[in-house]
Amino acid sequence: MIIRKSVSEIEKMRRAGSIVAEVLERMREWVRPGVTTKELDALTEALIHSRGGIPSFKGYPPGSQHPFEASICASVNEELVHGIPASRRLLEGDIISIDVGVILDGYHGDAAITLPVGRISADAQRLLDVTEGALDAGIEAARLPNRAGDISAAIQLYVEEREFNVVREYTGHGIGRSMHEDPQVPNYGRPGHGAALRAGMTVALEPMVLAGDSCVKVADDHWTVVSCDGNLTAHFEHTIGITQGEADILTRL
Ligand code: MG
């Protein structure tokens, strides 16, 4: 069931989203060679708490045998999403996806960026640019009278025209009082298919892009999703609201 939000609910989501945006903005300074992903997680958790929010990834999903135990997903190089912060030190030339979710006043914000660690290769930079461009293409397609499939197709086309691949197993999603609501918004799809977009819908769009082929697997830690061939991957995400006009980006400062 797709839950459309009132104007006041959207404003609550924007406040949660602004904490997410602040974390990701600060991450541009925090990410550098030598820092550990656990340190990035601790900095994030402190910032979220100082703003009155709750890190929504921590302990997710409730009741699971292997709940996620950090406030960020930190996914380095061939790690696509859901990397667990650890004592790993970032190296010059790495790329790192940081995904963060915040609950404030009962509403969620969720966003991700992939950042360079120091100087990176031209190939790695192109992967980041294409993945961020795919998110922009998805946001551009997130308008009336389109359907969810139009967003999916826009992301897929943008990525595949540039000779990268999208992941099939993990998708964007509705978001609101829950981190994951209907509808699913895959990073591939057919125009004119899927749920009709309506003003008041709130969704997290999140292109996950592979430099190699689109095979992924989950590591032994039960969480980290990695490319099967070891090639680089990237991930960008925003929480947006559907309006009568262009999409309203809720995870932006
Ligand atoms: Mg998400």
Image (cartoon, rainbow, N blue to C red):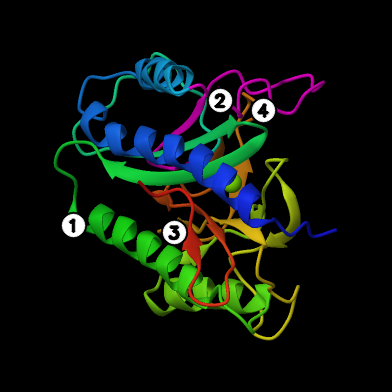
Q: Residue at x 79, y 60 (%)?
A: 2
C-alpha gap between disc 2 and disc 3? 32 Å
Residue extending furthest toward the right: 1
Q: Position of residue 197 (x, y in %)?
A: 68, 74
C-alpha gap between disc 1 and disc 4? 32 Å
The one nearer the camera, 245 or 161, is 245
Amino acid type of the residue that numbered disc 2 sits on in the rendered structure: Pro
Residue extending furthest toward the front: 8
Tag 2 residue: 55
Q: Nearer the viewer, mark 2 or mark 1?
A: 2
- Horizontal relation, residue 210 to residue 34: left or right: right
Question: Which residues lie in the magenta part?
Answer: 52-80
Q: Residues within 10 Å of mark 2 (few under 14, many from 20)?
A: many
Q: Earlier in the sequence, mark 3 or mark 1?
A: 1
Q: Is residue 112 above or below residue 75?
A: below
Q: Is residue 57 visible?
A: yes
The one nearer the camera, 240 or 41, is 240
Amino acid type of the residue that numbered disc 3 sits on in the rendered structure: Gly
Q: Residue at x 30, y 20 (%)?
A: 89
Amino acid type of the residue that numbered disc 1 sits on in the rendered structure: Ala
Tag 1 residue: 122
Q: Main secondary structure of the magenta part?
A: loop
Q: Is residue 241 above or below residue 137?
A: above
* SS type, badge 4: loop
Q: Earlier in the sequence, mark 4 or mark 2?
A: 2
- Residue 1's image quarter? bottom right
Tag 3 residue: 212
C-alpha gap between disc 2 and disc 1? 34 Å
Query: Is there a contact, CB below 8 Å, between mark 3 and mark 1?
Result: no
